[in-house]
Amino acid sequence: MPNILIINGHQPYPFSEGRLNRSYVDRAKSFFEVRGDRVRVTEVAKGYDIEAEVENHQWADVVFVQFPVNWMGTPWSLKKYQDEVFTAGMDGRLCQGDGRTAENPKTNYGTGGALEGTKYMLSVTFNAPKKAFDDEAEWFFRGASVDDLLFPFHQNMRFFGVDQLPTFAAFDVMKNPEIEADFERFDTHLQQAL
């Protein structure tokens, strides 16, 4: 039975209470529990214990992170979580330094991760439409993909030696939502990726 850490990174705003991201967290939790996996859930906006979260990352076989993309990245409270939890884990629990050695200080940066064998999946919601991505004719992202946009998050996980699973994205969730179709895609995504 794998250990699954689910992180709800939604930051509530007056125009966005977080119901959609919570629904994805609930669906993921149900999916994992039905499989017989052990599940822990952290809702970042409600607070967390830094040491317990470092331990959660060490415990997890899969880290599932759900969040809305805010200003082309993670919500501020999820970034704060990363800054606090990941920094605390740099004492050897999440990584052994940055991978370089005194004998060879210019190579192997980012190879000190202590979580080899762990996997992670990002599940994100966007106000942007799907067509805004992967299309060089689109002005804003200029052909960039969702994963290109989320590159800093991916690199943070790579720094700890965690392997990436395919990212799920729901698009246009505020202006042209297709919630039921997105939930069906999400369920299929989980079944195929895990």
Image: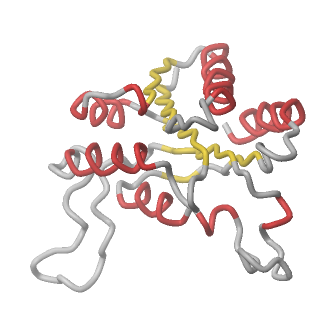
Q: Pinpoint residue 59: horizontal percent, then vertical percent.
A: 35, 30
Judged left or right of residue 46, residue 100 is left
Judged left or right of residue 127, residue 47 is left
Q: Pinpoint residue 113: horizontal percent, then vertical percent.
A: 31, 56
Q: Nearer the viewer, residue 95 or 15?
A: 15
Q: For the C terminus, which image quadrant?
A: top right
In the image, what residue occupies the spot 76% across and 45% down?
170
In the image, what residue occupies the spot 78% across and 80% down?
139
In the image, what residue occupies the spot 86% across and 82% down?
137
Q: Nearer the viewer, residue 45 or 189?
A: 45
Q: How is the image coloured?
A: secondary structure
Above or below, 40 against 91 in this view is: above
Q: Quadrant of residue 49?
A: top left
Q: Quadrant of residue 52?
A: top left
Q: Quadrant of residue 32?
A: top right
Judged left or right of residue 89, residue 152 is right
In the image, what residue occupies the spot 43% across and 54% down?
157
Q: Nearer the viewer, residue 138 or 159?
A: 138
Above or below, 13 against 82 in this view is: above
Q: Pinpoint residue 95: horizontal percent, then vertical percent.
A: 25, 53
Q: Nearer the viewer, residue 104 or 44?
A: 44
Judged left or right of residue 103, residue 41 is right
Q: Residue furthest front?
A: 14
Above or below, 34 against 21 in this view is: above
User: How many numbered badges does the structure rendering display?
Assistant: 0
